Image: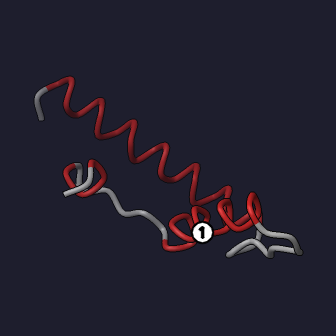
Amino acid sequence: MSPAEDAALHLDPALRELQTYAVEARYEEGPFPLPAPRQELLKAIEQLLADCQAVVEAAGTGR
């Protein structure tokens, strides 16, 4: 089980696709479209950050 699964966090599928995007962009030639619009990705990253912070805070208070 991954740390995200342990913490019951939801990872947006577009964020999972960024790994493939990064590998292809690093090792291949060509234009590589992002898996989602930049604003959508930023929103998903900010939500994941908020979710992670909430898990850490809850763990610190023993909830």
User: Residue at the right extreme?
Assistant: 30
- Relative placement, left or right, of 39 versus 11 is right
Disc 1 designates what residue?
20
Image location (x, y in percent) of residue 29: 86, 70
Q: If the image is split into quadrants, where does the C terminus sit?
A: top left
Q: Residue at position x 63%, y 58% from top?
A: 43
Q: Where is residue 28 in the image (x, y as percent from the top left)?
A: 78, 68
Q: In the rendering, at what x and y percent does residue 10 appear?
A: 36, 63
Look at the picture and state if 63 lies above or below 28.
above
Q: How many marks?
A: 1
Q: Quadrant of the N terminus?
A: bottom left
Vertically, is 41 above or below 59?
A: below
14 or 53, which lies in front? Answer: 14
* Way the structure is coloured: secondary structure
Q: Residue at x 22, y 34 (%)?
A: 58
Picture quarter containing residue 37?
A: bottom right
Q: Give me the residue at 46% from left, 44% from top.
A: 50
Q: Using a 10 Å C-alpha cutoff, classify the residue at mark 1 as few (fewer than 14 neighbours), some (14 to 19) or many (20 or more).
A: few
- Seen at 39% across and 36% down, the residue is 53
Question: In the rendered view, would you say 7 is above or below 25?
Answer: above
Q: Is residue 30 left or right of residue 25?
A: right
Identify the element where label 1 is drawn: helix
Q: Is residue 4 left or right of residue 29?
A: left
Residue type highlighted by circle 1: Thr
**Quarter of the image where one finds residue 22:** bottom right
Residue ranking furthest to the left: 62
